[in-house]
Image (cartoon, grey):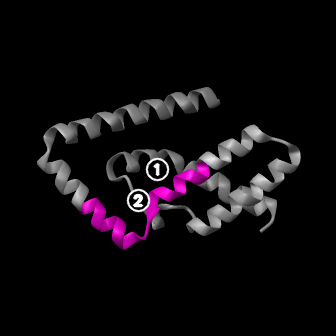
Amino acid sequence: MNFNEALKIYKKYQEHAEIHDKLTCIFAILPESFLPYPPNLIEEALNVIMEELWKDGDKKSIDIIKEAQAFLISYENDTESLERMIKTLTFLEKNPELKKAKLDHLERSRKSWLDFKDKES
């Protein structure tokens, strides 16, 4: 994979970050099919980008990519994830305080994402 191909995959993965944050707030572990590309392809792309950044001596950007790479562990195969989602939603339905806490967390997540995007522009 060349650098431009890797960059294209990374940008799609970055766009996915907003929904990732909200979904993991509720489900913790997500189905791999939610990713814009298979996890191994994203991992390869991130490694290609980090190699180029290493050559340029850009440690700060490497740290950002490593952080993005760490999010990949919050995905599992679709069947296991669906089963976990069902259990989680059932548990939340039986525990109103926890359900409210999760909903509050979602609201904070939206606000923090908007704040982040405002700082970016």
Q: Amino acid at mark 2?
A: Leu
Position of 45 compared to 119: left or right? right
Residue 22 position by quadrant: top left
Between disc 2 and disc 1, whose residue precedes? 1
Mark 2 touching mark 1, by CB under 8 A? yes
Question: Which element carries disc 1, helix, strand or loop?
Answer: helix
| Residue drawn where x is 56% and y is 68% of the image | 38
Quadrant where the N terminus is found in the figure: bottom right
Residue 115: % across, % down: 52, 27
In this view of the protein, which residue sits in the foreground, 36 or 76? 76
Q: CA distance from mark 2 to mark 1?
A: 8 Å
| Residue drawn where x is 50% and y is 58% of the image | 73
Q: Bounds of the magenta span?
A: 68-86
Position of 99 compared to 67: left or right? left
Residue 9: % across, % down: 66, 59
Is residue 36 located in the magenta-colored stretch of the structure?
no
How many marks are shown on the rendered structure?
2
Can you identify the residue that label 1 sits on? 20
Residue 61: % across, % down: 73, 41
Is residue 71 located in the magenta-colored stretch of the structure?
yes
